[in-house]
Image (cartoon, helix red, strand yellow):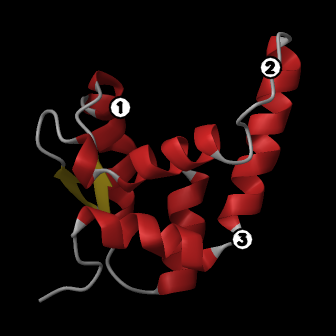
Amino acid sequence: MDFLEHLQRQLRTPIVLVWDRFQAHKGALVDECVAPHSAHLEYLPPYAPELNPVEYLWGWLKTNPLANDPIVDLQLLTHRTRCAARRAQRRQDLLRSFFRHTGLSLRLK
């Protein structure tokens, strides 16, 4: 995974991946991709959207930049969603608020 290689070069620290229990996040292929990077996998409880910061991101996108825009073209919807997500990516305060709302810590104790 190019992303993990880039992340590991930038952080120079062990990586912990916190994933939901989506079936595609489990299995030999994922283990194969993660193993060379010495990343540790942690899974969220089976159904716990309130612990998943990505759920808060999707909720924010749907009720803010994408709200009240009745797009009927899938290509246009995809483009606008990606643009809105990229803008959110640059808003560290917003992203941190999604983590804070989960109550999970980003620091090792």
Which numbered disc flags the more N-terminal residue, 1 or 2?
Answer: 1
Q: Are marks 1 and 2 in contact (CB under 8 Å)?
A: no
**Of the two numbered discs 1 and 3 in the rendering, the one whose residue sits closer to the viewer:** 3
Q: Which residue, given by chain and number where applicable, does mark 1 sit on?
A: 29
Residue 70's tag is 2
On the rendered structure, is 21 left or right of 45?
right
Report the residue at 75% width, 55% height from top.
86
Report the residue at 82% width, 10% height from top.
72
Is 61 in front, or is 11?
Answer: 61
Screen quadrant of the C terminus: bottom left
Which numbered disc flags the more N-terminal residue, 3 or 2?
Answer: 2
The amino acid marked with disc number 1 is Leu
Pinpoint residue 97: horizontal percent, then vertical percent: 45, 72
On the rendered structure, is 96 left or right of 101?
right
Which numbered disc flags the more N-terminal residue, 1 or 3?
Answer: 1
Pinpoint residue 17: horizontal percent, then vertical percent: 32, 59
Report the residue at 31% width, 50% height from top.
52
Q: Which residue, given by chain and number where applicable, does mark 3 sit on?
A: 90
Q: Secondary structure at mark 2?
A: loop
Within 10 angstroms of label 2, few (less than 14), some, or many (20 or more) residues?
few
Residue 16 visible in the picture: no
